[in-house]
Amino acid sequence: MSESNTMRARLLDQAPIPGAYRKAYEDALRSLFERRLSGWERVRYLVPTAGGLTAATLLLSLALTEPATTPPVTRGLLFGLAVLGAGWFAIGMRVLRKGSVHLVRDRRTVVRAALLCTALQMAFFAWRCTSDTDALPGLLVSSTLFLLAVGFWIEQSIREARLFAREERLRSRLAELRVEDRE
């Protein structure tokens, strides 16, 4: 449970909300944080989901069928990349199965996965550059992708701050309605 969800639960337990207000509050929260996927957004999630499954399948088959003379580092990298592909597949399937995206939890997961993948790519190419200068273009491309992922992380952090601010305004409006009801 995120820090915001924990705080929300504690506040609601301390000052119980009457049934009608609680339902309206929970509906407003759901509409604030959860968004149904449009047709285009389904495609946007379907492409990396299919790519993750394809990559996981191909890389795992390569790792399992490479000759015995294949260096253990290469085999380990193939397994690791297959796990990353499977992770992308799992993230995408969860969102597609729900048919909606949670604007904090799901997007944060995607951004973290992108940061992890690009950081690992960058680390691999940096390691390869120590013994092979032909890996330099890979390092430059992976560094660029990492910087893009950092940009997405910053954008997501700003979105989350805005959503949490809207949640606070919703909570204060609910408190105002409760006070008006008592009067």
Image: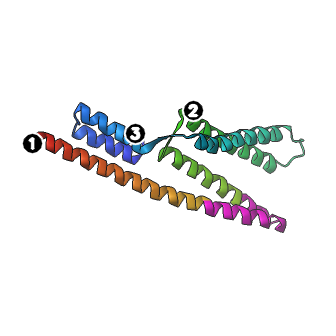
Alpha-carbon distance for marks 1 and 2?
46 Å
**Quarter assignment of residue 141:** bottom right
Q: Position of residue 40 (x, y in %)?
A: 60, 43
Sequence-wise, the earlier of marks 1 and 3 is 3
Alpha-carbon distance for marks 1 and 3?
29 Å
- Is residue 50 shown left or right of residue 29? right
The answer to which of 119 and 173 lies nearer the viewer is: 173
Q: Position of residue 12 (x, y in %)?
A: 27, 39
**Quarter assignment of residue 18:** top left
Tag 3: amino acid:
Arg
Sequence-wise, the earlier of marks 1 and 2 is 2
Q: Which mark is residue 30?
A: 3
Query: Residue at label 1?
Result: 183
Query: Residue at label 2?
Result: 97
Q: Quadrant of the C terminus?
A: top left
Q: Position of residue 174 (x, y in %)?
A: 24, 44
SS for tag 3? helix
Mark 1 vs mark 2: give the one in front: 1
Residue pictured at 79% horizontal, 40% vertical: 58
Which residue range is magenta in the image? 124-148
SS for tag 2? helix
Residue pictured at 53% horizontal, 33% vertical: 98
- Is residue 88 shown left or right of residue 8? right
- Report how many numbered discs are placed on residues in the image: 3
Sequence-wise, the earlier of marks 2 and 3 is 3
